[in-house]
Amino acid sequence: MAATTHTVTNQPPPLVGYDVFAADRALVEAVERHLDPALLDEARGELSALGLTSGSAQVQEWGVLANENPPKLRTHDRYGNRIDEVEFHPSWHRLLGKGVSAGLTSAWSRPGGHVRRAAGFVVWTQVEAGNGCPLSMTHAAVPALRTDPVLAAEWEPRLTSTVYDREMVPAAQKPGALFGMGMTEKQGGSDVRANTTAARPLAEDGTYELTGHKWFCSAPMSDGFLVLAQAPEGLTCFLVPRVLADGTRNVFRIQRLKDKLGNRSNASSEVEFDGTWARRVGDEGRGVRTIIEMVAATRLDCVLGSASLMRQAVAQAVHHAGHREAFGGRLVDKPLMRNVLADLALESEAATALALRLAAAYDDGSEQERAFLRLAVPAAKYWVTKRCTPVAVEALECLGGNGYVEESGMPRLLRESPLNSVWEGAGNVQALDVLRALQREPGALDAYLREVGQARGADHRLDGAIKNLLTELADLEGVEGRARRVVERVALVLQGSLLVRFAPPEVADAFCASRLGGDWGSSFGTLPHSLDLATIVERARPVS
């Protein structure tokens, strides 16, 4: 006899089988805004293809499996030989291969490449954020390698390839390669000048032998790594290949894998160098200056990653509320739930608009845009990544008890949410970097003020926020103790200016009223009730 007491009703359908790109109106509009019109048709086609892949049930299952089956360290083979390999679930390789083939490491020489890649990164990492780490570092290594034209000529074609090759063979034998990075050490953390890894020059010019350790080295199965070590003339950047040209394995001893809160599909490791062969990148003693462009690019990816996670959290919350009924109607139509969803949608859209604006500055490449990035990247990294966790928590709550269950996917988003605020310099590091730009690079502030000034006169609350920020910046005496306050305002004013200029009036009005005008509570769902919240929520709906 068929069961009669277990009929499933009032449960939202899975959010699958849709175009993750096309369903994100804020992202689509940002791409259209920042790309040359001649590139738009091609870019839309590529991004929609990636969006359909990302929204497919099969690929979403890959993300689940990669997360549920974290990498395993194999230090030795069955015969006792040291191999230092990390074993991944097949789903990890499928995800990483798709990311590479989608061009997420090939932005630097492609017209509109950074905007196209940024949009693709936001779309693709909604499936599973872990594979974003090797994609990000491979992409970001290019500007550092360009300080040495010979190394760039050798490695850049491999790093920007759309072919994923996981074999442990010399990079010269591979159609594509991945890069990692090793900066921090256990005694210094973000204070990389305290590094103790030593670099001893070898007979061949530009080659060294490294001895020391790295406390955090993600994606240890990459083909090469940029690392910092102390050479005779000071801290220097080096390229460490995983496999040497003769086919032997470089000394790259993986001591253990980190047992992380989230990002579990990606391997983060501690590694030891003991007579490890390396090639110098840039001049001795100029390591930080050499690697800084890689750091800046990975910081932008932290902003993109947080924007991606927020978008997925909001999409899931709006989707759930649009199908779930309670107290005589759909949740999405209840005034209080609508307020919460609209508030979350504002945060997500503001993050997306800012992230794509930064990517467009990379494509522009002018002196003014480079100056703008010097201030805007650390400010965005500070603020957007910090907003990610509150958004994930509130979005999870929108699903009620269902959101607290692993099968919903929301706990995975929540565990991932603090990551981008920690990696590539935590909050205080970003705030201090903004202060350095303000104090040492007048062109950075000028470029920022020109950017936000384009929206002056369009909203009185934004005008007031700009005026208050200028007052704050006029007195930099003892500013370190209030650096977070300053940087928060820098980021909010920039987000507000972008939304006032480019977002629908309902979105800009709500953002300025709450984030800049102070008509807001201490939690999500406290927007002024007089705003057009239904339009904001509808705009955030992932599937119509």
Image: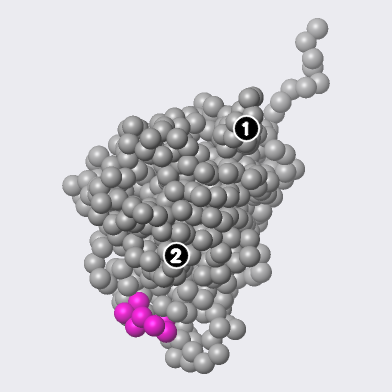
Image quadrant in which the N terminus is located: top right
Is residue 211 depicted above or below 90 in this figure? below
Q: Nearer the viewer, residue 452 or 154?
A: 154
Tell me the residue at 36%/80% (across/down).
Answer: 441
User: Range of the magenta residues?
Assistant: 438-444
Q: Position of residue 117 (x, y in %)?
A: 35, 47
Is residue 436 depicted above or below 512 in this figure? below
What is the quadrant of residue 342 in the picture? bottom right
Residue 368 visible in image? yes
Q: Position of residue 391 (x, y in %)?
A: 60, 56
Residue furthest front as drawn: 203
Which residue is the site of mark 2? 231
Query: In terms of secondary structure, where does tag 2 sit?
Result: strand
Q: Nearer the viewer, residue 491 or 189?
A: 189
User: Is 303 one of the magenta-colored residues?
Assistant: no
Amino acid type at circle 2 is: Ala
Tell me the residue at 56%/69% (across/down).
Answer: 194
Q: Nearer the viewer, residue 1 or 173?
A: 173
Q: Is residue 455 left or right of residue 42?
A: right
| Most common secondary structure along the magenta stretch | helix
Amino acid type at circle 1 is: His
